[in-house]
Image (cartoon, rainbow, N blue to C red):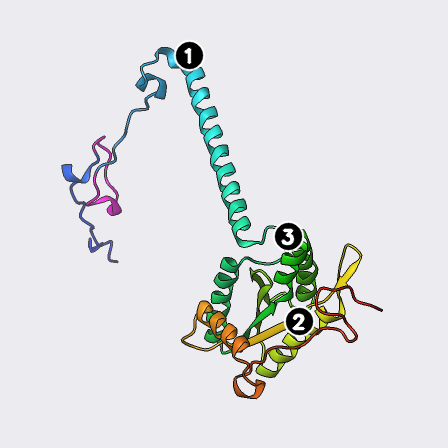
Amino acid sequence: MADEFGTAVIIPTAAVLPSDRHGDGSPRRDGDHGKPPEQRHPVVDATSILGFADGVIPKSVQDSLAGLVQEVERLREQVAVAHRHEAFLQSQLDHHPFLPCLTRRAFLTATARLIETSLRVGLPGTLVYLQFSGIDRLKAARGLAAADAALAHVVPLIAGELRQTDLLGHLEGGDFAVALAVSEDKGAEDKARQIAGRIAERPFDWQGQRFSFTASLGIAHFQAGLDAEQLLAEADRARRSGDDVGKQGVFQNVDLILEDELPLFQPLQF
């Protein structure tokens, strides 16, 4: 009946204004209002930009580009070689020239990191100073080769008593330092005596003669306010002062010469 009396809803048609059309005359969609017109860029051949006709790069230019690529590769290889050489030189600075241990510089650097980590997580640690005074006397009596051979004999014995987390460094002459990670006071003292005892059990043979050494030991425990250098000095002071183990956790002058042995650096009689 609505259609009979003309009551149908009439929807007015809005006029399409010029602003409602794209630049090409096509009408905009509802979501297109307010957007800038799409920009169309002409496609240009790269070779035409370089000034080459017909899209062909001359052979001379191709050869020059190839030469530049080769030069870049050569320079890249030189940089890689320089980095490898730098790493090699750094390792030479960190490791003793002929002993399987760290140099003093590298030992102190690594010990500083170990101290920082141990104090941060609240774990104990200890630095042990070991001096085998007889090695210097051996050098004076038998020469440099004998002293070097004695060091090469002693270091593996020390390292064999350590864990992978511990550090071993050669300071000078017959002086060594060991940093023990996660080591309680009593455990560190026992480990130091164990190292010294191990060396006493294995005398050094040189040109048909057998020698052993006397060890002097000092211990200093990781503590806030002491860096690696200061801790090493504290362990050395403890070694020289002769403090009792019960006082500062240090001890010294452990006599390791085998029984029935002649004076130091004389052949052992068995």
Picture mark count:
3
Residue at the spot of label 3:
144
Looking at the image, residue 118 lies above or below residue 151: below
Image position, residue 48 (x, y; %): 33, 17
Residue contact at pointers 1 and 2, CB within 8 angstroms: no
- Please state which amino acid type lies under the numbered disc 2: Thr
C-alpha separation, residue under disc 1 versus residue under disc 2: 78 Å
In the image, 157: left or right of 26? right
Asked which secondary structure carries label 1, the reply is helix
Q: Is residue 27 found inside the magenta-colored segment of the image? A: yes
Residue drawn at (59%, 50%), measured in percent from left and top?
97
User: Which residue appears at 43% of the width and 74% of the height?
Assistant: 226
Work out whether mark 1 precedes mark 2 in sequence or the reverse, and give the earlier one: 1
Amino acid carrying label 3: it is: Leu
Q: Where's residue 135, x and y in %?
A: 64, 62
Mark 1, residue position? 60
Q: Is residue 102 visible?
A: yes
Q: Please tell me the numbered disc located at residue 119.
A: none
Q: Which residue is mark 2?
A: 214
